[in-house]
Structures are given as structure tokens and as C-alpha cells.
Amino acid sequence: MNNANDKTFPDIRDAVRDLCAQFPDAYFRRIDEARGYPAEFVDALTRAGWLAALIPQAYGGSGLGLTEASVIMEEINRCGGNSGACHGQMYNMGTLLRHGSEAQKRAYLPKIAKGELRLQSMGVTEPTTGTDTTKIRTTAVKKGDRYVINGQKVWISRIQHSELMILLARTTPLADVKKKSEGMSIFIVDLREAIGKGLTVQPILNMVNHETNELFFENLEIPAENLIGEEGQGFRYILDGLNAERTLIAAECIGDGYWFIDRVTAYTKERVVFGRPIGQNQGVQFPIAEAFIEVEAANLMRYEACRLFDAHQPCGAQANMAKYLAAKASWEAANACLQFHGGFGFACEYDIERKFRETRLYQVAPISTNLILSYVAEHMLGLPRSF
Ligand SMILES: Cc1cc2nc3c(=O)[nH]c(=O)nc-3n(C[C@H](O)[C@H](O)[C@H](O)COP(=O)(O)OP(=O)(O)OC[C@H]3O[C@@H](n4cnc5c(N)ncnc54)[C@H](O)[C@@H]3O)c2cc1C
């Protein structure tokens, strides 16, 4: 495949590819079949320091930019793996880094950089309110030197492979705030102390082998010092972190997209039906070429989002558009790859059905495609607000 990406950041790409080569397709296939967690793979990434890319050197990380971090995530997916098992460890700490106190940063970031603490989880979504985040019902009420938490979250990922979670809860009732985005706060929850003492975790079996859970809070007490930043500003802090998350996930989708295109081009050159390679038929070529064009275009937007983020400029629009384009492009590439493998696309040993499921997630989570369209319509085009 002749794409520009292979020539950017060759040192990072080579090093991540070397590490990924120790975890071939069969490894991820076995983990998927067992609905397991790729612990050895995540440990190897942690030991090599890749998941600490965005943590500044002063706190034990490598202090790289989002651009370099996105190349790491892209390469994992491009090699056949799934960054979804561990991407939270790379970006969830951003909330702490930007809004935490110096004492909190000193307490957590060096340990997160070493992998001694995993901050892989972020609890925002709730079953009754869905995407309408300002209506969340989980509350945190201050009582002396503690906050008492009650409520419910759903789809909270990697709880069973995290020591820490960032939690969004309402600290002032919706009825008592001027703007609906006010009155929410974020906390760091130590899961080792919380589970079984006010927090109950219920795993959700799902289409992807993605460890995700329903959480029930019943009078969970956490120290007041676990509040991050100012009380009532949590929604704004969460939004601040989403640009990095969306851009990194765009890069993962781009890695997936190239993986599907590599596989389908190789296969359609080899597979002979009606006396010629199926890739000689334009009915086969065109959907693959179309998907390739879309992945390449999404890639440009991903680099633009990274460039702005690293220059500390507003990048909400570009991060959203990169995520939209990349998730759509990887899905088109997945669809073409599955289609042109015919029946073999459905055989687990080809890994296509696994990657097909994995990449499909990103049109729904962490933000659904419709909500990105709504953002662009309202914030970029000035159309009237619909909600
Ligand atoms: C595997 C997995 C892992 C996840 N991990 C996490 C996690 O770690 N932490 C976390 O907090 N959340 C997590 N989520 C939740 C995820 O962010 C949400 O599922 C997603 O944001 C959509 O919210 P919802 O499921 O409540 O859908 P809803 O809000 O119920 O929406 C359903 C559909 O309706 C559409 N829709 C809703 N309102 C409108 C509108 N006004 N206009 C047009 N379309 C609309 C949406 O686009 C969507 O397609 C995860 C989800 C999954 C599936």
C-alpha cells in the first residue's frame, strides 16, 4: 500500500511494530475467543513506556505530543491489536494533569506513568440519561471531609483492569444552577477501596471483547480531597479531555482502516474465481479504493487535530471531525474487507470478523456519529440548537 503515513515518525512506528510483532493475530484471537484481557500485551506496552507518552517528564512520563501518542495507538490497531484495551491509561490522566492540584499530580501521575496505578476508567454515561449528560442523576454530597455518592453508571470500561476511575457526579441539583452544564464535579475514585463498600460492579457482555460494566453507587464515601479542581466545574473539565480522546480514537480507526485495506488488497490479488483474481474486477476494486481514499482523508484531519492540540489551540471541531471521518472510513474498509473475503471473512481464523466488530464500536462510543453531526451543525454552521 502506498500511503504517506508509513514515512512519518519512523522510530516510533518501528518500535511499536517490533513490540506488537511479539503479539501476533493468534494472541488477540485467543483473547477474543476467551473474552479475556490482553494483560501481557498491555504490560509490555506499559514497561516500554508507550502508555505514558502524554505524561510530562516532570511526572515520570515521556512528555510526547498528541501527534506522537496517536501514532502509537494507530500502530497497535494497524498491527491487528485493539488499543481499546488500554487507551484509557493514555488519555484519562489528562483531566488530572490539566485540573488536578500539584499534590494530586505528584501523588498519582508518576505511579500512572510506571503502571503501578492504572487510571483506565472514566464514569460519565448513565442508563436513564444517555448522551444528555447534564441530566445525570448520580450525586455527590459533601459531608464533613467526605463526599457521599449515590446513583448509577453504565458502560464504564476497564473497571476490572484499573485501580482508579474518574467519576462525574452532580454536586448541585440541576434545579439550583443557572446553566445546566454547571453544578457537576469530577472525582478520583480509588476502586480498590470502593468496590464492595458502596460500589457494586456488574459486567456487561457485549458484541466486542471490550470489558465494560454497570456501576451502582450506594452511599459510597470518598475523601473530599479526591475532588479534582473546583466543585461545580466538572462538566467543563470532562469536555476539555474529550479532544485528546477523540483524536486518539480517530488514529486507532485509521490503523484499523489500513489493516483492512492491507488484508483485502492482498487477498483479492490472490483469490482466483472465474479464471482471474477477483481484484481484477472493478466491482471489487472500487469499494476498496473508495475506503482507502476515505482513510487517507480522515488521516489528514487527524493530523490537523493533533497539530492544533499540540499548539494549545482550540481543536474541538477538528477532533470531532477526525473521529467522525475515521470511524466511518474504518467501517467502510471493514465492510469491503469482509465482503471480498466472501465466506472466509466470517471465519474467526482470518481475524476480519473480530476487527470488524471492534471498529464498529467507534460510531457509537465514546460519542455517537449523530452527536458529532449535531456539534458541527450548531457550532460550526451556526444552525439553531436542537437540544
Ligand atoms: C463498549 C462500550 C464502552 C463504553 N465505555 C464507556 C466508558 O468507559 N465511560 C462512559 O462514560 N461511557 C462509555 N460508553 C458509553 C458511550 O459513550 C455511549 O454509549 C454513547 O455516548 C451513546 O450514548 P447512549 O448509549 O446512552 O445512547 P443514547 O444517548 O441513548 O442515544 C442512542 C442513539 O440515538 C442517537 N441520538 C440521541 N439523541 C439524538 C439527537 N438529539 N439527535 C440525533 N440522534 C440522537 C444517538 O446518536 C445514538 O445513536 C461505552 C459504550 C460502549 C458501547
Image: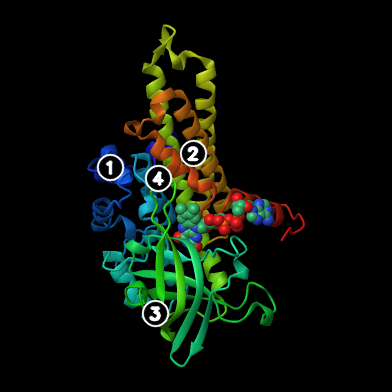
Return the disc, 4 or 1, that comes first in the chain's sequence: 1
- Residue under pointer 4: 74
**On residue 330, which mark appears?**
2
Rounded to the nearest angstrom, the CA distance separating label 1 from label 3 is: 42 Å
- Which amino acid type is shown beneath numbered disc 2? Ser
Task: Give the quarter of the figure containing the C terminus.
Answer: bottom right
Rounded to the nearest angstrom, the CA distance separating label 2 from label 4 is: 12 Å
Return the disc, 4 or 3, that comes first in the chain's sequence: 4
Relative to 316, say whether 265 is above or below.
Answer: above
Rounded to the nearest angstrom, the CA distance separating label 4 from label 3 is: 32 Å
Q: Nearer the viewer, mark 2 or mark 4?
A: 2
Which image quadrant for residue 225? Answer: bottom left
- Which amino acid type is shown beneath numbered disc 3? Glu
Disc 1 packing (10 Å; few <14; some 14–19; many ≥20)? some
Looking at the image, in which quadrant does ligand 1 appear? bottom right
Q: Nearer the viewer, mark 1 or mark 2?
A: 1
Relative to 264, say whether 318 is above or below.
Answer: below
Disc 3 packing (10 Å; few <14; some 14–19; many ≥20)? few
Q: Check disc 2 and report its element: helix, strand or loop.
A: helix
Residue 61 seen in this snapshot: yes
- Residue under pointer 1: 30
- Residue under pointer 3: 102
Task: Give the quarter of the figure containing the N terminus.
Answer: top left
